[in-house]
Image (cartoon, rainbow, N blue to C red):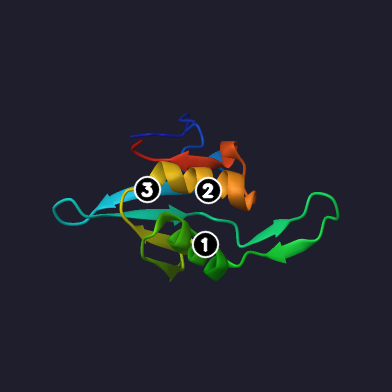
Amino acid sequence: MDFAGFEGGGGFDKSDADSNKVHIRMQQRNGRKSWTTVAGFPESVRLPKTGTVLAVDFDKILRALKKTFKTNGVLIKDAEHGSVIQLQGDIRKEVAEFLIEVTAIITKDKVMVHGA
C-alpha cells in the first residue's frame, strides 16, 4: 500500500488548539461515587496590564475549591498532564464557573467540560 499522497488533516498533533485548554471531566468510581478532575491548567500566567509572569499556586486553588464546594480533593503531579486537581463528587459545571469567574486565570473559551 502506498500512502504517499495521503494528507492527514493534522489530527492529534500537539500544536492542536485543544492542547492549551483546561479539561474538566467526571470519572465514575463505584456505585454513585465519582471524581471531578481538572487537567491542562497552565503552570504560569501572564498578568494583562503589567505583563508579569507569575506561577499558579495550585495548593491555594485546591484549598479554595474544597472550601467553596465542601468536598475533599487532592493535587496530583502527572508527567503528561501536569498538575491535575481531583475533587470528590460530580461538580463539573460548578468548578468551571468557579475557575472562570473567581480565579479569572482562564477564560470561558479555554474551558472544556466533558460529558455535561
State the SS at label 1: helix
Q: Is residue 20 visible?
A: no
Q: Earlier in the sequence, mark 3 or mark 2?
A: 3
Q: Which amino acid does the dot numbered 2 rest on?
A: Phe
Q: Is residue 26 visible?
A: yes
Q: Mark 3 to mark 2: distance in Å?
A: 10 Å
Q: Which amino acid does the dot numbered 3 rest on?
A: Ile
Residue 91, label in figure: 3
Q: Nearer the viewer, residue 23 or 102?
A: 102
Quadrant location of the C terminus?
top left
Residue 95 lies, in percent from the top left, at 46, 48
Quadrant location of the N terminus?
top left
Q: Are marks 1 and 2 in contact (CB under 8 Å)?
A: yes
Residue 107 lies, in percent from the top left, at 62, 41
Q: Nearer the viewer, residue 41 or 17?
A: 41
- Report the residue at 49% width, 64% height from top: 62
**Disc 2 crowd, CA 10 A, few/some/many (<14, 14-19, 20+):** some
108 vs 85, left or right, is right
Q: Which residue is mark 2?
A: 98
Q: Which amino acid does the dot numbered 1 rest on?
A: Ala
Q: Which residue is mark 1?
A: 64
Residue 45, label in figure: none
Figure disc tally: 3
